[in-house]
Structure formats: C-alpha cells, structure tokens
Amino acid sequence: MRAESQFGPELRRRRLERGLSLRDLAAAVPCSASYLSRVERGLRQPTSLVARLFDAAVSADGELIALAHESAPSGAAARDDPIRCVPATQLVQAFEATAAAGAAFATGRGRTAESARGMFDVLRQQGHAASPAALLPALAAQFGVLRAAAGSARGLARQQLLGVGAHYAEYAGWMVQEAGDGVGALALTDTAAALARAAGDDALAEYALLRRADIALYQRDGRLVVEWASRVVRGSPSPLVRGLAAQRMAQGWAVLGDASRCLSALELAIDAMAAADEVASGSGIVLGSGGGGRLMEIVRGWCYLDLGRPQDATIALEAGLSRMPAAARRARALYGVRLALSYAACGQLRRARDRGMIALDEARHVDSASVRQQLGLLAVMVRRWPGNVELNNFRMRIERELAVA
C-alpha cells in the first residue's frame, strides 16, 4: 500500500484505539471535523506540520510523521525549500572574484590578522540586522587579504592568518545560506573547515562541520542533521561546540518525530553548555550566533513545534525571545515567525497574527532565506481559517513579503 493511502487509515486506527471521536481529535489539533474526516479517508493530505500535530495527539511516536514524509509528492521538498533556489556559482564566484581583488591590499602580516579580526567583530554585529548582499563583499575582500598574506607567511603568523580566514569563510557561508544558496554555503563551509585544520584550530574545524547540520536542518533532512551533529558531539574537543551540536541533534530528532531522543539530546546540550560556561575565557572569536546556552529555550521551543507540541513551543519561544537583544533582528525575525507559527498551530489566532506582524517588521531589514522558509509555512497554516478577515489580511502581507523576496 502506498504511503499516501496509509496515513489516513493509520490515523483513524489510532484515533479509535484511543477512544477519540472525530470532534475530540479535531479539537486537539485544532482543525474541523470535516477536514479530519477527509484526511482519514485519503481525500486530503495534511501539511508536514499538521501531520506532526496529529502524530502528537494520538501518541504515534513519529510513525505518522514518517508516513506523511513518505507521501510528499516528488520534488515537493525542493519547491518548498528557498535555501536551494539560487545556483551556487552565482554567489560563490562573486565571493571569489572579490576575494581575489582584495588580495592586492595584503600588507604586514601581523597587522593584517589583527585588523581583520577587529573588522570581523564589526561585520558579525552588522550581520544581526543587515542583508547578506550588504555584508558578503566586505567579507570576501577581507578573506582575500588574509588568504594572500597567509600564502607568504610561515609558522605562528601563518596559523593566525589562516585561523581568522577560516572564521571569515564560515561566516560568509552562513550569509550565502541566508541569501538562498545552500550548495554555495556548503562549499564555503568546507573551505572554512580546511583552513581551520591547517591553522590547528580543532574547535573551529568541528564547528564548520556542524554547519552542515545547520544547512540540513533547513532542508528538513532530519537524518542528515543527526548524522553530522552526532559526529561533532563525539569528536569535538570544545564543550561549546559539543553543546551547539547537541542542540542541533535535538532538532534533528524532532524533525524525525523521535521525542525521547530529542529530549535526551536537549539534556546533553544543557550539560555541555554548563561546562562551556565554566571554561569560557572571554577571549577569541565567538563561535556560532554567540547565544550559546542562552538559546536553549529557543531550541527547546523549536523542537516542541516539530514534535507536535505547539502550546509548549509558545512558552519556550516566548521565554527565549524575551532575553534576545533588540539589535538581533535576524534572530528575532526567524524565531518570531516560529513563535507565530506555534500560536497558529494551537489555534491562538490573534496571538499568531500579533507575533507574526512583529516578526514581519524585523524580517524586512535582513533578507533571510531561513525566515522566508518559516514565513511560507506560516502562510500555509493560516489559510486553514479562510473566514477570518484579520488573518486573511495578515496572510496577504506575508505573501507580499515573500513575493518581494
């Protein structure tokens, strides 16, 4: 029997097994009883998120999620994934061309590494609230200077130049991902890992590998997320990197619908982050977003939504966002949309609209493929209430934002 014909009957079997009526389960999701009836009869295919809500409501432990994933039409993932929409060569070739031009400005090696490191901190701060197009040329020029200077350096000076260059390549990879080019992001991530290994920076090399799990997460490939994150958890010498990897591993298990392993990974992340706080020196270039353990509630809320627990997701995401700096527009947009999606998933429509409008205001400034992906999910979710005028107006604003991008 094909997966698309299995989902509905399996949902019905589990509903009856738990003694739930159509109205009972529809209220728990929430959705209309008529919609649920059509899903059970195979006349409607639920979206991935709605399938997760059904899975949690009947305690299917990820089995319904797996059936829904198998029943997705061929090519649907690529169409729904804005991270794959730009050919890698466009952004990576432009980055390389600018880097090559920047090489002409390489001067004294010590001053080059020191000034590039200071500039990196500035560019990271700008990245919280600026578009990738505004940052990538500056990142590429500095990277070119560092690469050229390292080519003629030796010993410790060369290691320092390569190490700072690795940070530039890793951050540029993230910006390329945010511009919508996942393949190009992987190319720059691999460059960062190679430079970090050459510089003897094992923590950064492992973090660059972890970025592969980040990219897989936005491509909704839970198994690949777990594979890369688990490798880093096992191999990284840095408790911070292990903590970040455990966070990503939890998100991967959540995509797969495995609540037990997800929650275990979250506990592992908490322990690793606590260890990282104990050894933090305050020196060196920060890895990741800089949030570290402060993002635990955000990650927990992200996982809860994928596990079909939107009410728990709203609590965790609200707590995480309340501690996020106002200047972190990119993060506030992404997690704000995720919060709005969580409210919509549990039927709190006014809160969904209000939180979504705030996130849309943040999103206008940052041009983020990750945010657009979540906005697309939110637009699909709010279509379930066509009779709600305020929600329809909100949906149209989302669609205008997506059309502009």
Image (cartoon, rainbow, N blue to C red):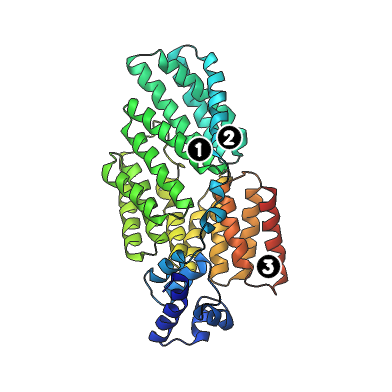
Of label 3 and label 1, which has the lower sequence position? 1
Q: Are marks 3 and 1 in contact (CB under 8 Å)?
A: no
> Is the residue 106 above or below the residue 219 in the image?
above
Q: Secondary structure at mark 3?
A: helix
Residue drawn at 38 percent across, 47 percent down: 244
Residue at which label 1 appears:
184
Instruction: For marks 3 and 1, give the one nearer the viewer.
Output: 1
Give the image location of residue 4, x and y in percent. Answer: 47, 71
Q: Nearer the viewer, mark 2 or mark 3?
A: 2
Q: Tally the marks.
A: 3
Q: Is residue 194 left or right of residue 128?
A: left
Crowd class of label 3 (few under 14; some 14 to 19; many from 20; radius 10 Å): many
Q: What residue is shown with label 3? A: 391
Asked if the residues shown at circle 1 and circle 2 are in contact, with their CB atoms under 8 angstroms apart, the answer is yes
Q: Say whether residue 9 is left or right of residue 382.
A: left
Q: Residue at x 35, y 56 (%)?
A: 266
> Where's residue 306, x and y in %?
45, 63
How far apart are labels 1 and 2 at the CA level?
Answer: 9 Å
Please give the name of the residue rendered at 40% of the width and 49% of the height, measured from the top-left corner. 293
For the residue carrying disc 1, how many other residues have a C-alpha within 10 Å: few (<14), some (14-19), or many (20+)? many
Secondary structure of the residue carrying numbered label 1? helix
Question: In which quarter of the view is residue 307 placed?
Answer: bottom left
Q: Amino acid at mark 3?
A: Leu
Q: Tell me the number on the disc at residue 90.
A: 2
Label 2 to label 3, Cα distance in Å?
A: 37 Å
3D distance between C-alphas at marks 3 and 1: 36 Å
Q: How crowded is the residue under tag 2: few (<14 C-alpha within 10 Å), some, or many (20+)? A: few
Name the residue: 46% across, 17% down: 148
The numbered mark, 2 or 3, whose residue comes first in the sequence reads: 2
Q: Amino acid at mark 1?
A: Gly
